[in-house]
């Protein structure tokens, strides 16, 4: 087996950013006219992923939300347990939701499936304390 050089060994232990050190990077800066228009532009789409809570759903009861289902993601809950959540994108935002009935409805859909979600409220559980959030989920086409 060939002997590694000190430079090769050092490079393998460095982070990707450290490995890029000294590398030339090029990018384009918007022109002065484009930069001047920034203050007058309106917000169009939030790239910040938000977790939609039960309170958020309650504020939109019986209102249809049209979105794309973008797959599943595990996120930690307040007890630091991993919970399966659906990832969704509307015309104006990205959000994650972990309601069991919603997740069960979408988990088998292909990525980028267009769907409609309508939150219908909570229903008391018969066998355990608490309640279940009820969603109408439809595929669009």
Image: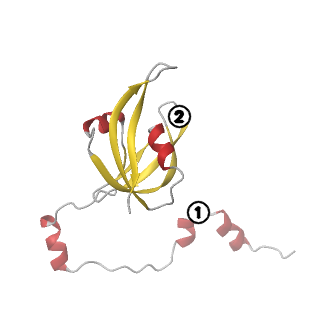
The answer to whether residue 85 is seen in the rendering is no
Residue 82 image offset from top left, x and y in percent:
55, 39
Q: Residue 22: where, in percent of width, then height? A: 51, 76
In space, the residues marked 2 and 1 are separated at their CA atoms by 28 Å
Which residue is found at the position 40% from the left and 81% from the top? 26
**In the rendering, at what x and y percent does residue 38 appear?**
17, 68
Number of the label disc, if any, that sits on residue 45: none
Between 108 and 8, the one nearer to me in the picture: 108
Q: Residue 33 versus residue 126: which sits nearer the camera? A: 126
Q: Which residue is mark 2?
A: 80
Residue lying at 29% horizontally and 60% vertically, measured from the top left: 91
Compared with residue 67, is residue 38 higher up or lower down, i.e. above or below?
Answer: below
Looking at the rendered image, the quarter that the C terminus falls into is: bottom left
Looking at the image, is 114 positioned above or below residue 24?
above
Query: Which is more toward the observer, 12 or 89?
Result: 89
Image point 56% across, 66% down: which residue?
A: 16
Is 16 located above or below residue 33 in the figure?
above
Quadrant hosting residue 89? bottom left
Label 2 Cα crowd, 10 Å radius (few <14 / some 14-19 / many 20+): few
Query: Which quadrant does the N terminus fall into?
Result: bottom right
Tally of numbered tags: 2
Residue position marked by numbered label 1 in the rendering: 15
Give the class, few, some or many, for how many residues have Cα within 10 Å of label 1's Cα (few <14, many ≥20): few
- Percent across and percent down for residue 9 are 71, 68
Give the secondary structure at mark 2.
loop
Q: Earlier in the sequence, mark 2 or mark 1?
A: 1
Q: Quadrant of residue 97?
A: top left
Q: Is residue 128 left or right of residue 138?
A: right
Q: Outermost residue toward the right? A: 1
Q: Nearer the viewer, mark 2 or mark 1?
A: 2
Q: Residue furthest left?
A: 40
Q: Secondary structure at mark 1?
A: loop
């Amino acid at each position: 087996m060939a002997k590694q050089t000190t430079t090769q060994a050092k490079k393998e232990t460095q982070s990707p950013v450290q490995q890029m050190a000294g590398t030339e990077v090029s990018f384009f800066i918007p022109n002065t006219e484009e930069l001047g228009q920034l203050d007058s532009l309106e917000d169009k789409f939030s790239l910040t992923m938000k977790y939609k809570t039960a309170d958020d759903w309650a504020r939109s009861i019986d209102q249809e939300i049209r979105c794309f289902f973008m797959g599943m993601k595990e996120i930690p809950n307040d007890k630091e347990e991993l919970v399966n959540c659906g990832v969704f994108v509307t015309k104006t935002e990205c959000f994650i939701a972990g309601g069991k009935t919603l997740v069960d409805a979408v988990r088998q859909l292909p990525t980028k499936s267009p769907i409609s979600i309508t939150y219908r409220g909570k229903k008391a559980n018969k066998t355990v304390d608490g309640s279940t959030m009820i969603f109408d989920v439809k595929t669009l086409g």
